[in-house]
Image (cartoon, rainbow, N blue to C red):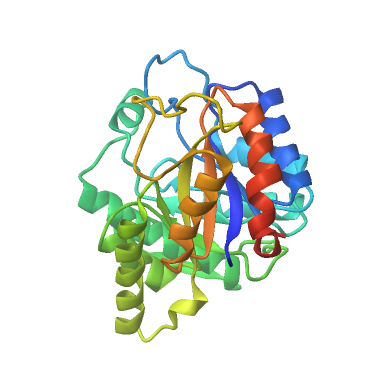
Amino acid sequence: MSLKLGIHTGPQDLSMEELLRVWRRADEAGFHWASVWDHFYANPLNLREDPCFEGVASMAALAGATTNMRVGCLVFCALFRNPSLLAKAAVTIDHLSGGRAEIGIGAGWFEEEFREFGYDFPPLGQRFEQLEETLQIVRSLWREPVTNFEGEYYQLSGAVCSPKPLNPNMRLWVGGNGPRRTPRLAAQYADGYNVPYQPPEIIRERLGALEQACEQLNRDPAEIETSVNLRFHMRAHAGDGAADPPDNYVPGSITGTAQQAIDRIGGYVETGVGGLNIAFRPPINWDAYEAFIEDVLPVFHTASA
């Protein structure tokens, strides 16, 4: 089965030492990808005092702690940072990582963290408009000698991004669950398209929407990497009890034994998606993590190496 396996760890509810342990073990084991996410509050929001590290700094820590995996963020919120700053930060991390960095950008959705940290929370349509401008600016700064941009929300005049990414083809991802506008933006501006926490039938629909958008733009969809994030609830041993906390389960999850995980992943392979990222939520079940590495990862190792 052909699939690139990665991990996806929110920098929340864990110490930095625990995060480093997760990342280093994944790098050693041969995962293809590791990413963080970008929030001010832990998700789901139970207590505002629950620890949550900032996304750019967390991605830099991930890059510095690993040597082999692609490293990224799925996804940076377009409205949290000026697009020029985000573009420069990504280039810096790409150089730190030796050319392994990629970033995803999304429109944002977590209203409480917007308002309580002093950000406006505009209607969804405006957030998508700002996302579209952000994608154009980041792509131009990475790839063009000079960037001039006159948008409704952002303006650049003679901006020069130097150095350029160490990897001249550093991927820019669009991520989200939107059924129409998100795949269209990915087709128009991105090199990667990520859908979080959805079952295979929804992934098949989203990939179909991406292909349709590419056809309308006369773009080859094979140019765009695709991936899905899945929650990790696998058991360490066949005899363990159920590992699906009702308040933490979503349809896009891996549950049960190692063989059940392999079968579940096989359902995603059949959709045609190119990559699958295992999303860990604390507390980390280290035994189950090791069981996945020993029993599941080798099935897909040729694609993940």
Question: Vertically, is 20 above or below 201?
Answer: above
Give the residue displayed 60% in from the left and 31% down from the top.
237
Please say if 11 is above or below 252: above
Nearer to the camera, 84 or 112: 112
Q: Is residue 133 left or right of residue 33?
A: left
Near-viewer residue (80 or 207)? 207
In the rendered image, the vertical position of residue 83 relative to residue 171, given as above or below: above
Residue 44 coordinates in the image, percent (x, y): 38, 26
Q: Is residue 78 left or right of residue 165?
A: left
- Quadrant housing the N terminus: bottom right
User: Which quadrant does the C terminus fall into?
Assistant: bottom right
* Residue 153 in sight in this render: no
Q: At which x and y percent is residue 199?
A: 35, 51
Given residues 294 and 227, the one toward you in this image is 294
Of the pair 41 and 245, the residue shown nearer to us: 245
Does the image show residue 176?
yes
Q: State the image quarter where residue 209 is shown.
A: bottom left
